[in-house]
Amino acid sequence: MVGLFLAQVLMSFNVAALPVSLGGMVEEFGVPPTVVSSTIVVYGLAVAALVMTGAKLGQRIGWVVVFRVVVATFAVSALMMIFSPTVGWAIAGQAVAGASAAIIVPALVALIAENYHGPQQATAIGSLGSARAISGVSAFFIGGALGTLVGWRPVFGIVLLLAVVVFLFSFRLRSDRGDPGIRIDLVAAVLIGAAIVLLTLGFNNLNAWGLLFASPDAPFSVVGVSPAPLFVVVGVVLGQTFFWWTRRRAAAGKVPLVDLTVLGSSSERAAVYAMFIVVALEAALNFTVPLYIQIVQGRTPFDTALAMMPFNLTVFVTATLVVRFYGRFSPRTIGVFGFVLTTGALTWLSFVVTNNWETVPTILGLLVFGVGQGALVTLVFNVLVTAVPKTLAGDVGSIRGTTQNLASAVGTAVVGALLVTVLGISVARSVVEHPELPPSLVAQVDLDNVNFVSNDELREVLEGTDANQAQVDAAVAVNEQSRLDTLRIGLLILAGISATAILPASRLPRYRPGEIPDPSPEPAPEPSSEASA
């Protein structure tokens, strides 16, 4: 269990280290924060696109053997991050890490389902949830300290060390045999992979390429229409085609890429939707707060770690302890309560957040959000694992990996595009209404390319204009207020997204307190000696 726990820590620490390293990579590579955030998007994209294929590879080759191979490739990705000369190398390193995690994710679920049952299984699943949370705490704290005192690269030295330790622990895992008879459905693999790639690229570039009409930054256009919404539409169509093909293959008696019976009931589908929303919210918050603190406020990664500590620490504690409530409350009760907490906390934060993150109301909001987040991330995973036989654990792992990483990529991409769009509208309105910013000065600044910049960067831009000191101070004040208003609007929108999951959460299972279902089929009875005679 220590090896499986550290494997989850390995993946989660890598993901959590990326937002903390945001400021350092922006400064060293000299690129906008939205470009650096592509490392986060690419990682989630690779996992989501390949995890179903990875699950079938694990079943075919054997979970322990393939687990060792991909942990080694994860170590290679850490080396690429440590020695990356350009942001392109960093993005490629996260693509390798994501491809490796695409097999680690279902491997963890399969190995837990094989070795643990009943209450022990719920506790083991809770340990994975707490591993994700403690990784966030340690990555923000250790990564923040290293990023401030040394630089962002040593953070990924820790990722390398974790990969080596997990590889050594893998030799303590019980070996299992693969099934060479399993065939990988290449058509389904291409369909779901292409669908997820197009969906993520489309959402990630809605702002850069244009929400409807193509911008100058778009790589191409179709009769003037931006490729971003087209990618989203085509991705949805390919996703629907994947489900049609999978059902057709299962009806023909062939092995599908993923067994859709794991989503056979409304409660299981509600669990997947709840998982998507809760992971997207976490990714959005983990991107928004470091972006605001490091880029806008110009503070250090260590300041970011301290600001996020209440949230990450609360998620860790809640994810660990929530399994104790499974004997008292049904998944439906815990799920609805969790989303009510996240919705209320985000709404509260949208009203109380200020330029000072150390205020009591802000910390209180992060604590409440962490409680809801920690309870939900363990709950929905446990619902999916306990709802199917252990033979389908790999399929549950692939569904979990696809959902979580697509949600993480989409959450990061959408909130980034949303914040930049709202900021552009806010700045444009504010400068027009401000009496000290004449149209002649506004005309010298490119308001069509508004992004999150520090006050020092804004002053450098204004030095190239004929603005006097009073006008520069006025512009900085407008930018500060516009960025804060944008953050508040973004948090309120996230609260609305959280609220949409309350009703689906009411369709989660309603087990009786203390009852844990066992979906595994009963073994066939041994024939009696009389029957044999």
Image (cartoon, grey):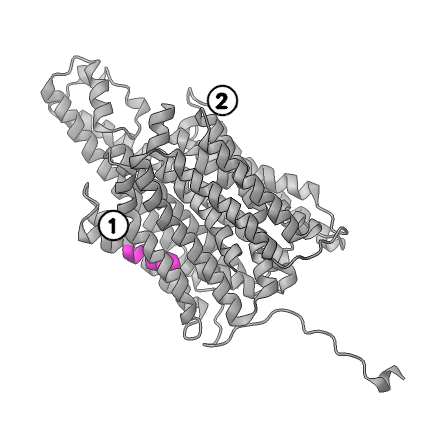
Q: Is residue 365 above or below residue 23?
A: below
Q: Secondary structure at mark 1?
A: helix
Residue 432 sits inside the magenta stretch: no
**Which residue sits at x=18%, y=43%?**
356
Res 435 → quadrant: top left
Q: Nearer the viewer, residue 189 or 307?
A: 307
Q: What x and y, as percent, mark residue 32?
A: 36, 27
Number of dots carrying numbers: 2
Q: Nearer the viewer, residue 437 or 357?
A: 357
Q: Nearer the viewer, residue 333 or 359?
A: 359
Q: What x and y, as percent, mark residue 109?
A: 56, 57
Furthest-bottom residue in this view:
530
Tell me the crowding category of disc 1: few under 14, some 14 to 19, or many 20 or more residues within 10 angstroms, Cα based.
many
Residue span colored magenta: 367-375
Q: Amino acid at mark 1?
A: Leu
Q: Amino acid at mark 2?
A: Pro
Q: Is residue 217 above or below residue 301?
A: above
Instruction: For marks 1 and 2, give the one nearer the viewer.
Output: 1
Residue located beneath label 2 in the image: 219
Residue located beneath label 1 in the image: 349
Q: Secondary structure at mark 2?
A: loop
